[in-house]
Image (cartoon, grey):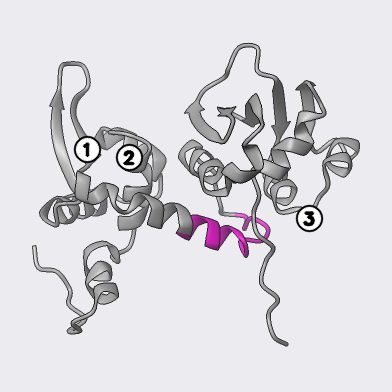
Amino acid sequence: MSRRSYGQYCGVAYALELVGERWALLVVRDLILGPKRFTDLRRGLPRIPSNVLSARLKELEQAGIVRRRLLPRPSGIVYELTEYGRGLEDIVIRLGLWGASSLGEPRPEDILIVGSLMLALRATFRPEAARELQATYECRLGEIVIHARIDKGALEVVEGPLADADLVIETDLTLRALMSGELSPSEAVESGKVRLTGKPELLDRFVEVFHIPPAPVLAA
């Protein structure tokens, strides 16, 4: 499969030749969280046509970024990042944080998937603000449920609920405004947009530890 060339001897140009095609970085984003079957990737990217996903996976395999691995039944073939592909992890996470700062309100057609929320917590996590913190959080956004364990500057984010979490946060996409400081913890709770179960004082620590930088001020 031929790769489009920018005709420039430049690391940025070459990187875009490898992962700059539509959907390619989102495939990498989902594989950062672990190996996935084709159907898992389709579920995480519900608007990608199957033939386009197949093409992106083939291109990423040819570039040495993704590989296929055969697992015992019933899993079958899964796709995963190679060591070379893993080099994109920090880049994708930092790119997500950069984009989140000016993300704004969701458009009517926008959807949230569990992988996006998991990576959002990883991207916005500030280890320096969590050096003395040991806490567990469960975040519920409709049908999406994930949990985070913080252990003195270390973070683990996992899909699914967590029994006896120190704080359960139930909300919607208001979570972004909370993490960006556009909405204070007290305002979020008083408005009913955020509902808490557990230790409510940990919400203040949550927004300190998971922080979206302020949006840039655009020139008039």
User: In this orientation, does residue 146 appear?
Assistant: no
Where 153 sits versus 111, above or below?
above
In the image, 37 versus 129, the foreground residue is 129
Q: CA distance from mark 2 to mark 1?
A: 9 Å
Residue at figure coordinates x 54%, y 45% from the top left: 120
Left of 30 or right of it: where is 201? right
Give coordinates of residue 211: x percent, y percent: 66, 49
In the image, 176 versus 156, the foreground residue is 156
Residue farthest toward the bottom in the current orientation of the protein:
220
Give coordinates of residue 125: x percent, y percent: 57, 44
Residue at figure coordinates x 54%, y 62% from the top left: 99
Judge depth for marks 1 and 3 and give the one in front: 3
**Quadrant in which residue 46 is drawn:** top left
In the image, 62 versus 135, the foreground residue is 135
* Disc 1: which residue: 79
Numbered mark located on residue 182 in the image: 3
Amino acid type indicated by mark 2: Leu
* Quadrant containing the N terminus in the rendered view: bottom left
* Disc 2: which residue: 41
